[in-house]
Amino acid sequence: MSQAETAMAETEEADPPTIRQHTYHRCPGGDGCPNNDGRSCVYCDGGLASCTVCGGAEGTLPSECPGKLLDEKQEKLIYAGKLDFRDGRWREEPSMGVSSHYNLPPGEAQANSQ
């Protein structure tokens, strides 16, 4: 059994959560921003995507939110382009996000995102 198959089998549940869209972290900005001392904030500036439900961020974001926290094995496989969560189930495919396409040969990233 491949690493991706093992990760998928370990996360199968009888009643999986129905959350599909990521809930992105939003920095409160202003006085609530931890970097309110004049430094740039990756959240306030809109430069970082991080899901508050699954914990995925940037290259470890699956196409859809699985509705629960990702474990380390899942994050590594998603980042490597070997695992994705889409249409309510785990798949041995790269995420539809751009970051996972870094591991694909030229041309395949476009074909997989259509």
Image (cartoon, grey):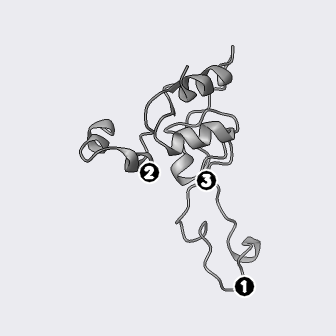
Residue projecting furthest to the left: 107
Is there a contact, CB below 8 Å, between mark 3 and mark 2?
no
- Identity of the amino acid at label 1? Asp
Front residue (pair 27, 109): 109
Please tell me the numbered disc located at residue 37: 1
Upstream in the sequence, badge 2 or badge 1? 1
Q: Which residue is depicted at the point 58% across and 37% down? A: 65
Where is residue 112, by image quadrant? top left
- Choose mark 2 or mark 1, whichever is in front: 2
Q: What type is the residue that disc 2 sits on?
A: Ser
> Image point 33% across, 40% down: which residue?
113
Disc number lying in front (3 or 2): 2
- Name the residue beneath numbered marker 2: 99
Q: Nearer the viewer, residue 26 or 91?
A: 91
Q: Which mark is residue 50?
A: 3
Image position, residue 56 (x, y; %):
61, 47
For the residue carrying disc 2, how many other residues have a C-alpha within 10 Å: few (<14), some (14-19), or many (20+)?
some
Report, in whole angstroms, how far the alpha carbon at label 3 lies from the one at label 2. 13 Å
Residue sitting farthest toward the front: 1
**How dense is the environment of label 3, judged by Cα within 10 Å: few (below 14), some, or many (20 and up)?**
some
Label 1 to label 3: alpha-carbon separation: 22 Å
Q: Secondary structure at mark 1?
A: loop
